[in-house]
Amino acid sequence: MLMPHQELTPREIVKMLDADIVGQNEAKRAVAIAVRNRWRRKHLPEELQQEVSPKNILMIGPTGVGKTEIARRLAKLTGAPFIKIEATKFTEVGYYGRDVESMVRELVDNAIGIVRETEKTKVEAEAKQRAESRLLDQLISPRPPHTATEPEEKEKHERSRERMKEMLAAGQLEDRKVELTIEQKGTPVMLGGMGLEQMDMDLQGMLEKIMPKNSARRELTVADARKVIIEQEIEALLDKERIHDAAIKLAENLGMIFLDEIDKIVANEGKGGNDVSRQGVQRDLLPIVEGTTVQTKYGYVNTDHVMFIAAGAFHKVSPSDLMPELQGRFPIRVELSDLTKEDFVRILTEPKSSLTRQYVELMKTEQIAVNFTEDALEEIASYAFQVNQTTQNIGARRLYTIMERLLEELSFEAPDMKYATVEVNAGYVKQRLEDVSKDEDLSRFIL
């Protein structure tokens, strides 16, 4: 099952990623080629398709430089099922923690959401027609029983229904009250612990079938009732088995799993304790990445063609410290560079949803016009770069803390300032950040 966006060329993918992410061209090119290879695979003869496995990617670079954002934006562009998960959440089988197979189950859940939305659009028109019919049934009295004057009564009833239908279409009955029966789902039973995730899903499904469904009569306006009825009709029209089958195929062929902090499951030489489990996590991850079949409540999922993008800072360890077998499953290595002051300036201005634009739009809701001058952006970028160099380097995330500190007073006073114009220039930035940035101990906590 191919999504339309899968036909994007690598150049087009990089261009679209550039609209939201600054720099890191090497990483963008690598993921763009990997996605295009999936499109190419689909055009191969059937027997060869099974032999072509995805070229998994290992991204190496400090926090806050765009590793996660590249993968997330890529999934959004291609319409592929995508999950981000921290490798540190897993433990080896036999230890308390999450089972590595749970990531595949999460991927299928994500795929079901995508397929479900697609199917909903297909049945929406019919659901709306059914909803209007049900609303009419609620608004007018039922058809009279058989009598000698049945034709006249029937005709009168039909005229009344047509008149009500016109009023409903014209929006004249939106505030009229109707009674609806609404089903209420019971509270799910949650089980915790290693190996209980699949059991929890199976038990939950069994209980849903056994337990009686609670239903309640509620009085709603026509406007609110229409939304509820449309949702009920969509549910009735959806073919759940078909959705589950399509979702499994989508997850198997286009699924993307982003494994963050993979460097944290590398065992340190000479240390015990958790390192035993870390090495075990790598062993448990290996079959999933190589290709295996995982049981989910919707059916069996094969991971042969799921694409894995792993990422880590690799400060204290190197990719070569991973198990050789696991290293071999990530043939594409890309190193993401530290952000420079110039990068920070671009991050503040170039992306469609840049931080400066977000704050400008937020202040607009209070009827306040905020203008950032060029020298202000240079100054903000300079502070971000400086604090990253002197304290912990957290990449672009430093801009969030600096912008919050910079505009804290304005955000607080905004509701009382109505229709004001505020210019944020270099002087404004220095006034609010100079003292904090000069004191290294203070900036360590505040910025």
Image (spheres, helix red, strand yellow):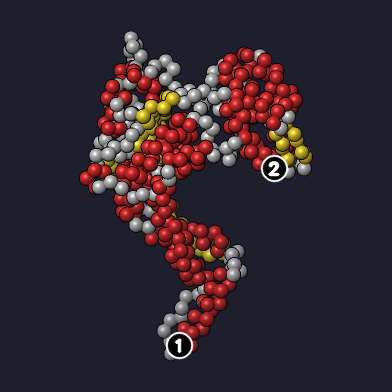
From the viewer's side, name the closer residue of 3 and 124: 3
Tell us which disc is closer to us: 2 or 1.
2
Q: Position of residue 281 (x, y in %)?
A: 31, 25
Disc 2 residue crowd, few under 14, some 14–19, many 20+, Cα 10 Å: some
Amino acid type assigned to the residue bearing label 2 in the image = Lys
Where does label 2 land, which residue?
364
Q: Position of residue 159 (x, y in %)?
A: 52, 81
Disc 1 residue crowd, few under 14, some 14–19, many 20+, Cα 10 Å: few
Q: Position of residue 78 (x, y in %)?
A: 42, 44
Residue 99 vs 305, above or below: the answer is: above
User: Does residue 108 show up?
Assistant: no
Residue drawn at 49 percent across, 80 percent down: 158
Residue drawn at 64 percent across, 35 percent down: 356
Q: Position of residue 380 (x, y in %)?
A: 65, 26
Task: State the SS at label 2.
Answer: helix
* Quarter of image, res 302: top left
Amino acid type assigned to the residue bearing label 1 in the image = Pro
Which residue extends farthest bottom?
A: 148
Residue 235 vs 407, above or below: the answer is: below
Query: Distance between the Cα atoms at labels 2 and 1?
Result: 63 Å
The quadrant of the picture occupied by the C terminus is top right
* Quarter of image, res 341: top right
- For this view, does 367 lie left or right of residue 446? right
User: Does residue 379 show up?
Assistant: yes
Where does label 1 land, which residue?
151
- The first of marks 2 and 1 along the sequence is 1
Residue 135 vs 405, above or below: the answer is: below
